[in-house]
Image (tube, rainbow, N blue to C red):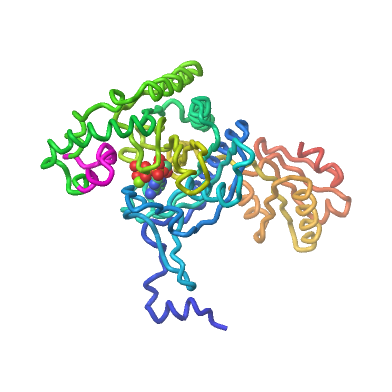
Amino acid sequence: MPCRFFLCLKERKMAKVQSVRGTYDLYGTAKRKAKKVVKIASETVEKYGFEEIETPIFEFTEVFARNLGDTSDIVTKEMYTFQDRGGESLTLRPEGTAGVVRSFVSEGMQQNLPVKFYYTGPMFRYERPQKGRQRQFTQFGVEMLGVETPQADIEIIAMAYSFLKNLGLDQSIIVEINSLGDQESRDAYRSKLVAYLKEHFNELSSESKERLEKNPLRVLDSKEECDKAVVANAPLYSDSLNETSKKFFDDVLKGLDLLEIPYRVNNRLVRGLDYYSHTVFELITDKLGAQGTVLAGGRYDGLVAEMGGGDVPGIGWACGVERLSMLLDEDVELPRPVAVIEVGEDVHDEALKLAYDLRNTGYRVEHSYSGNLKKRMMKANKANAYAALILGSDELSKGNVTFKNLDTGEQKEISLKNVQKELK
Ligand code: ATP
Ligand code: MG
């Protein structure tokens, strides 16, 4: 039966045999690097007692867009929202925290605090695609729920830093950190900021004029040049922190000093989402131009309550796997295989069996599919094999194969029984 997909494409003159704007196929070097990023991230955070969670790729829209006052870019203009056949409004997840917290609440995990999860997977945002900015991208993230002391903040930042260090990126990375304080401090800062921004109303971008009403803190985060100029002289957050918030932030910084984690306090740092409090931080590199933030996070003490899960504090971070992959200079080396090379058709069955047995005992085996000896040897070298096992009918009749060390070129006839000993 002809494939419906292709029939349909034929009718539309093959216009759509391409990926959607802002999405990419990940394979070869890029996929190997992305896999390495996730592997090192998982290994690092597992040492801190984090366990993996997998939440659905789509959720009810309200999981992400919880209140009408939400002014984050993600919620106001980047979500992929659709109605399913049952009439429910669903959204492809644009970030991981909301889904993890939804799961924490709906699965009733409040009994066993703290809860420490990590996740990885695709996120979807309708953004303008450019280098390091995609419409489908992969995040790796962590969430710690139930710890209100600065120890959580210190640990979570230390974990992010160790992860990038384990990836070999610590030389080009700096931690930027700020405190948004508790609710009282936020309110105090907010009024000061609004008063200041109103004085400069005419200099602001139209978007910031709008934000001034709904969430003035976001103006600090604006990427528009005219806003940046105004923001440069805005009141400093640190002047509005109350004693509790100041002490909290000091304790976090002391912890980072103790662990010798390099950081820079950035008084202008706020985060894109509305639910942060106290510590916010970003790990930034100077190697990716405008898309220099590779990892970002903060404390979100009000979020669980907002989702109906009670007064449980939270803190976490997420990193862009593709952005981090782009920073890895070298290709990721795969373990070198052994090549099984058959000479003549009558040894095919023996070759199949040998390759199967070796693979079952843990070897990576390249068993070429066609060609004469020369072609097959070329393929073995291309696959970066370290040894070749050459099967010819003469040797096989004696129970032997030719073992060739592909690095030195040395070769000798050995007994089939000794193949594994020789490979070691
Ligand atoms: P930005 O300011 O770059 O838009 P953001 O504040 O929207 O970042 P977060 O929501 O904090 O980003 O996501 C955490 C990380 O995920 C980012 O630091 C980045 O590495 C990665 N990331 C975010 N959006 C994208 C995207 N569209 N494409 C690729 N990676 C992304
Ligand atoms: Mg963004």
Looking at the image, which residue is at 63% across and 34% down? 49
Residue range corresponding to the magenta coloring = 210-226
Q: Which is more toward the observer, 374 or 252?
A: 252
Q: Quadrant of ligand 1?
A: top left
Quarter placement of the N terminus: bottom right
Q: Which is more toward the observer, 200 or 350?
A: 200
Q: Which is more toward the observer, 326 or 272?
A: 272
Q: Residue furthest right?
A: 398
220 horizontally vs 80: left or right? left
Looking at the image, which residue is at 48% across and 44% down? 305
Whole-percent x, y for residue 328 in the image: 47, 37
Query: Looking at the image, is 115 positioned above or below residue 121?
Result: above
Looking at the image, which residue is at 30% across and 39% down? 290
Q: Main secondary structure of the magenta part?
A: helix
Residue 350 colored magenta? Answer: no
Residue 224 colored magenta? Answer: yes
Quarter placement of the C terminus: top right
Q: Which is more toward the observer, 260 or 297?
A: 297
